Image (tube, grey):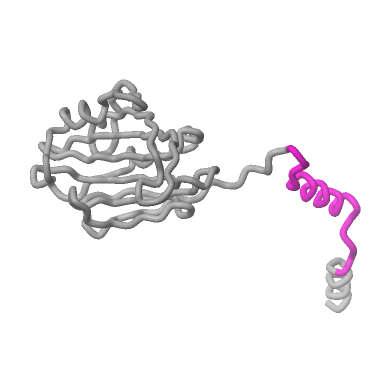
Amino acid sequence: MLSSLLLALAFCAAPARADDWLLEARRAAAAVPLPGEAAPEKPKSDWVAFDPASRLFRAQLPAEGWQAFEEEDALGTVVRVMGPDDPSGDLRAMLTIRLVDRDAPNFVSAKDAVEIMRRSGPGRDPSAVRPLRVSAGLARVFEVVETRRLPQDEGPAFPIELHQYVAVIPRGEAYFLIRLTTARANYLDYRDFFVAFLKDLKPIGSR
């Protein structure tokens, strides 16, 4: 028994073999980005369940980088989800979700809403509409590129090119209106996020 114990202690105290520490050194070196080289890709953030106080829907949001809150404005209840800063520092990505029904001010049907939002004009260029099957039904999805002057409140303003991903999902006479607004310069970084959010959104209740 004593000899076995001494043998075990000696094994634990033995120095690591050369090939062991060399392997670890290589792994550490591979994890360090070289100048001019992209950093190693980090694991994607987990998504967590989100259920607003109004209980109009349930969805998943990234666990990091996005902050959701619900408020009342002139058009009714809206959920706003603020995302990361634009690289320029002039804008934050913003996702908004509304359930538009007949009680909403200046209510129009889902079809008319799509036509209104797709109107082109100076500095405004909409895309064609395409259908997308999601958990909440059949979404009508399109994009709008437009130039606005920001900020819109008092003070100096400057033009910035924006990109909007827009989805309208009918729910009887009502419909969900979902928009993701980002800077045009990096809008492709948010396309997969927008589609993933749409596909996961689940209405709560009968409306």
Q: Quadrant of the N terminus?
A: bottom right
Q: Judge by depth and name the residue closer to the eye, 130 or 136.
A: 130
Q: Is residue 94 left or right of residue 167?
A: right
Residue 31 belongs to the span the image colors magenta: yes
Residue 204 belongs to the span the image colors magenta: no
Q: Quadrant of the C terminus?
A: top left
Residue 4, given in percent of the width and then of the height, sits at 85, 72
- Seen at 25% across and 25% down, the residue is 119
- Seen at 38% across and 29% down, the residue is 145
Q: Which residue is the extreme one toward the bottom?
A: 2
- Seen at 29% across and 40% down, the residue is 178
Residue 29, given in percent of the width and then of the height, sits at 80, 47
Q: Is residue 162 left or right of residue 56?
A: right
Q: Judge by depth and name the residue closer to the eye, 108 or 24.
A: 108
Q: Is residue 5 above or below residue 115?
A: below
Number of numbered discs on residues: 0
- Seen at 85% across and 72% down, the residue is 9
Which residues are the magenta region? 13-36
Residue 44, given in percent of the width and then of the height, sits at 53, 46
Q: Which residue is the extreme one toward the top?
A: 128
Q: Is residue 205 above or below residue 163?
A: below
Residue 92, given in percent of the width and then of the height, sits at 44, 47
